[in-house]
Amino acid sequence: MSQDHVHDVEISAAECADYLEQIVYFIDNELDEADCSAVREHLDSCNPCLAKYDLQRTVKQVVARSCSETAPGELRAKIMLRLQQVRVEITER
């Protein structure tokens, strides 16, 4: 294997890593149109990333279906109180 080929593989792996970081935002429609187009183009040409995208999307759908309950009022109140305490601690520093 030539050095140029090894270098190309490394660039591709780094490129894929960048796109894989964006997949969550892509699934949630949190990217601007230019970034969405770039991710779509990459997914169209990269089967490993497409498989990871499909898996991520499926997991997100399953979690969304499974998490339809709301927390009981008492638990929500405790969480909100704790969040407020953390905010106060942060602002006092």
Image (cartoon, rainbow, N blue to C red):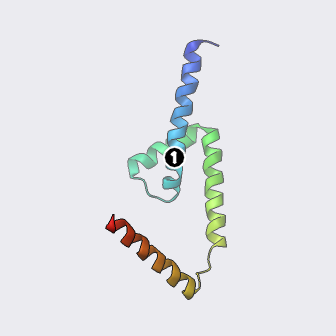
Which residue is nearer to you in this view: 71 or 41?
A: 71
Question: Left or right: 47 with respect to 40?
Answer: right
The image quarter in which residue 75 lies = bottom right
Please tell me which residue is depicted at 55% across the width and 37% down the height of the picture. Answer: 16
Please tell me which residue is depicted at 59% across the width and 85% down the height of the picture. Answer: 72
Q: Position of residue 47 (x, y in %)?
A: 64, 39
Instruction: Residue type at mark 1: give it.
Output: Glu
Please tell me which residue is depicted at 51% across the width and 34% down the height of the picture. Answer: 15
Q: Position of residue 28 (x, y in %)?
A: 50, 60
Which residue is nearer to you in this view: 5 or 38?
A: 5
Q: Position of residue 46 (x, y in %)?
A: 59, 37
Please tell me which residue is depicted at 67% across the width and 72% down the height of the picture. Answer: 66
Look at the numbered disc 1 and give the secondary structure of its residue. Answer: helix
Placement of 81 over or under 62, stated as above or below: below
Which residue is nearer to you in this view: 21 or 46?
A: 21
Which residue is nearer to you in this view: 83 or 56?
A: 83
Placement of 69 over or under 28, stated as above or below: below
Q: Position of residue 45 (x, y in %)?
A: 57, 37
Mark 1 = which residue? 21
Q: Looking at the figure, which quarter contains the C terminus? A: bottom left
10 Å crowding of disc 1: few (<14), some (14-19), many (20+): few
